[in-house]
Image (cartoon, helix red, strand yellow):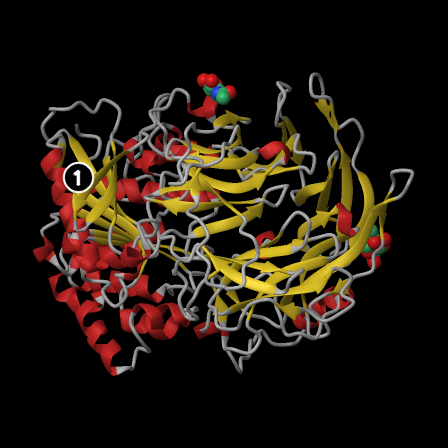
Amino acid sequence: MRWTALLSAASLPCGLLAAQVPLRSPLASGAISKMNKQNWKQAANSFSWKEAADIFSPKDLVGLGRPGAGVANVAGDLVLVPFSKYDFDEKKNKKSIFLAPIESTVKPLEIPLAKGGEAFWLDTRTVGHVVEGENSTLEFYAIDVQFEAESTLSTPKSPVLIGSFPSTGATNFIYNPASRHLVFSAEVYDDGDLTTVVQQDKEWEERGTTAFVYDETYVRHWDTYVGPKISALFSAPLSRTPDREWAFEQKWTNILKGTGHSSPVAPFGGTDDFDVSKTHVVYTSKDPVLPEAWHTKQNVYIVPVTGDSEPKELTCGKQGATHSPVFSTDGTKVAWLELGEDGYEADAFRIVLYDLSKDVRFTITDHWDRSPDALAFSKDDKTLYFSAGDEAKVKVFSMPVPPTPLSDETDYAKPLALTSSGAASGVQPLIGGRVLFSRSSFVSPNDVFVLSGIEESNADATLAKPPTVTQLTNFTAADLAEKHMSGGEEFWFKGALDRDVQGWILTPKGFKKGDEAAWPVVLLIHGGPQGAWEDQWSTRWNPNVFVNQGFVVVMINPTGSTTFGQDFTDAIKMDWGGKPFVDLKKGWDYILGEYPEVDADRAVAAGASWGGFAINYIQGHPEFGFGFKALVCHDGVFDAAYLGYSTDELFFFNHEWGGRPWDKHTKEVLDKFSPSLFVDKWSTPQLTIHGSKDFRLPETDGIAVFHTLQQRGVPSRLVIFPDENHWVLDHGNSLKWHYEVFRWFDQWVGMKAQ
Ligand SMILES: *[C@@H]1O[C@H](CO)[C@@H](O)[C@H](O)[C@H]1NC(C)=O
Ligand SMILES: *[C@@H]1O[C@H](CO)[C@@H](O)[C@H](O)[C@H]1NC(C)=O
C-alpha cells in the first residue's frame, strides 16, 4: 500500500485523489486510460500545484470568502452584504451576511445563516430572512438590528418568526415599506396559485413516467429541462403595527395572473427584473406571444402592487430585450435599459425613461457608445446613476434626469464617469448625494465603497475634482496580504483593420525585466464572444491563479469584445474565425516582441465557450503560427452548424452566423469557420473539459473533440463534470478543474522549471 503513504504526503493537493500518468505518447494512452478506470484512487503521478504562504493557489481561490454586492438600508447608514466561504473540513459552503456601517468606525457584524436562505432589508433596523422550514415550506423571520453610530452594532434578540410561505419556491424578495406589501417571485403551475404548488409538485413527481413532452421551445434552458411551471410575481400584505409587531397577511396575490407573462426572466433574472414603488410594481417579461428560443424581445409592464387591475405595457413594442426597470424615488417615473433589436443580446443598452404623470416615453444615451448594466435614481430624482463597462473596466456613471421632452429622440447629455478602475456593481444612491457601490478587481473580490463630494460636471462631462471614495469593508485583504497578486498592466496594439486593440499582461513574482525567456506564458481567451477580460475578480478564470503557478498571463480583448464601442462588438458577427484571430495573433506578437522575458517555446493557451471555439479553431490553423505547446478547451464549440440546431438560445446562433444553419449564406460562413472542418491539421496536445448540464453548448461537442484527437493520435485527455453547466461552480469540482489544467500545462511546458 505504498500509494497510501504517498497520498498523505504533499504529493497531492487538497486531498484530491487521482491516477494520472503523463500521456507522453498516443500509444501509451490506451493502456493508461484503462489503468485510470481501474485504479482511480492511485497517485501514480506526483503532480501537485505550488502552495506557499506567498502563493495564491487554486485552494486559496476556492477557500477565499465570496462577498456579493452591498445593499444599503433606507436611512443609508448600514449596508447588507451577502457572503459565503467554503469550509474544506466540512466540505460545506457556509453562508452569512455582513452588516457594515456606512459612516462610522464601528466594525462590520457577521450574521451566520446556518441554513442559508435569503436576507434583505425590511426597514432601516430590520433584516428579513427567509429560510427553508418543515414540510416544503419557507419560514420568514425578522432580525432586529441595534446600531449606534459611535458604539454598537448588534442583533440583541433572536430572530422573530413573522410568517411562512406555502412553497419553497418563493424567492427574490423586495420590500418597500411604503407599499406595505412584500413582493417576490415563485414558480407556479397553470392555475397560478402559490398554495397548490407543493401538492402539484408531488403529483408531477409521481406521474408514473419521467418523460418531458414539448409542443414549443424552450426544451431546455441553460442547465434545466423546462418543466410545467413558470415564474410569476406575487405580493402579500406586510406592515408594522403601532406596537412595532410585524403583520404578515398570508394572502398571496399573483399580480401576473392571466397575462402569460413570466418574471423574472430565466435563467439569470432576479430582483433586478422588477421594482416596487409605494403603489405599483414594474417588471420585465419575455414577450408572451413570440417563440422564446429565437426571440429576445422583453416588454416592460406596470401593475398595482395589490394586483387590483391588469398590467399596462410601457415599452413601445419594437424593442429587443429590456432589463433593470426601476422607479424614481417619488414613483412618478420609470427607467429601464433597452436593446434595439429583437434577436440580438449584445447591442448597446439605451436608457428609456417613462414619465408616468405625463404618459410620455423617451430614450436617452442614444449616442453614447457604451452599454449601461444597471440603473438607479438619486434620492432627489435629479440624477441617474449606473454602472457600465468602459475599456475593460466597469465604472460608475451619472447623468442628469432630463425634463420630460416632447420628442422621444433626446440625446440629453454625456454620462459622467465617477470611478476609473476595477469593476463596479450594485450602484445605489444614498441621501446626501452619496453613492454606494461594490467593486472588485484582478487583485480583490468585492468590497463596498461610498462616493461623496460629487460635484456638478463641466460641460465636457468631466469633474474638476474627483469624488471622495471611502472603503467600508475589507473582506479579503488580510487573507491576500502575503500573496503575490498582480494588478495587471494594459497594453494596446494595432489589430485587424488597423484598429487599436487592448489586452492585459500579468506577471509572476520574481519577474524581472531583462531575464530572457525565463517564464512560460499562457494566453487566456474569453467567451461570449461579446464579453471582455475586465479588471474584475473571477472565481472561474482568475488570472492570478495562473500567475502564481509561474505563468506570465496574457489576456486580449479581440474583435467582438464589449466595452470598446458597439462597432467593435458587432464586428464579430459572421466573422468568428476572421478578425478576432488577426487581433489575437497581433497581440501575441506584440507581447513576444515587447517581453523577451517570456519563453515562446513554453507557450500554452486556454479558453471557454467562444474561447473554447477559439482553441479548437487554433488547433486547425497551425499557419497562424502561435506555436502553443498545449491547449485547454472548456465547453467549446466543435461543429458550429450543429450549434445552430442544438443550443438552447437559437437567437444567438441565428444572429452570429447570419441566419439559420440551413440558410445558403449561413452555410457559406459555416464552411469557412466551423472548427470541425479543419481537424486534418490537429496536432497540439489538448485537454478538453465539458459539463454535462451545459445546455448552451452540449457536451457532445467536447466528446467529439476528444474522439477526434484520440483517433488522430494527438495526446489528449477529456474531463467530464456530470453536474456542471456552462460553468464549473461546485467547490470540489473547481479544485479538480484547476488540478487537471495545471497538470496538463506542467506536462507540456514544465511550469515549475524556471
Ligand atoms: C409537518 O408534517 C408533519 C406530518 O404531516 C406534521 O406532523 C408536522 O406538524 C408538520 N410541521 C409543520 C411545521 O407544519
Ligand atoms: C484592509 O486590510 C489590509 C490588510 O489587513 C490593510 O493593509 C488595509 O489598510 C485595510 N484597508 C482598509 C481600507 O481598511
* Camera sees residue 733: no
Residue depicted at 61% across the width and 45% down the height: 381
Q: Residue at x 55, y 76 (%)?
A: 212
Figure check: 658 above or below 577: below
Residue 187 visible, this angle: yes
Which residue, given by chain and number where applicable, does mark 1 sit on?
749
Q: Nearer the viewer, residue 320 or 700?
A: 320
Of residue 202 and residue 531, the one placed in the foreground of this image is: 531
- Residue at screen point 17% across, 70% down: 672
Q: Residues within 10 Å of mark 1 (few under 14, many from 20)?
A: some
Q: In terms of secondary structure, where does tag 1 sit?
A: helix
Q: Point out residue 339 in the picture as x, y percentages from the top left corner.
A: 45, 63
Residue 75, image x, y percentages = 70, 34
Where residue 478 sits in the image (x, y, percent)? 47, 21
Q: In the image as oriented, which residue stretches furthest toward the right?
A: 243
**Residue at left offset 43%, top offset 55%:** 411
Q: Quadrant of the N terminus?
A: top left
Q: Is residue 665 left or right of residue 209?
A: left
Q: Nearer the viewer, residue 546 or 40?
A: 546
Q: Could you tell me residue 119's position as x and y percent?
A: 67, 42
Ligand 2 neighbours mark 1 (CB distance < 8 Å): no
Q: Classify residue 12 by image quadrant.
A: top left
Residue 185 drawn above or below residue 123: below
Q: Quadrant of residue 705?
A: bottom left
Q: How many marks?
A: 1
Q: Is residue 200 left or right of residue 459?
A: right
**Quarter in which the C terminus is drawn:** top left
Q: Is residue 329 left or right of residue 450?
A: right
Q: Nearer the viewer, residue 681 or 591?
A: 591
* Amino acid identity at mark 1: Val
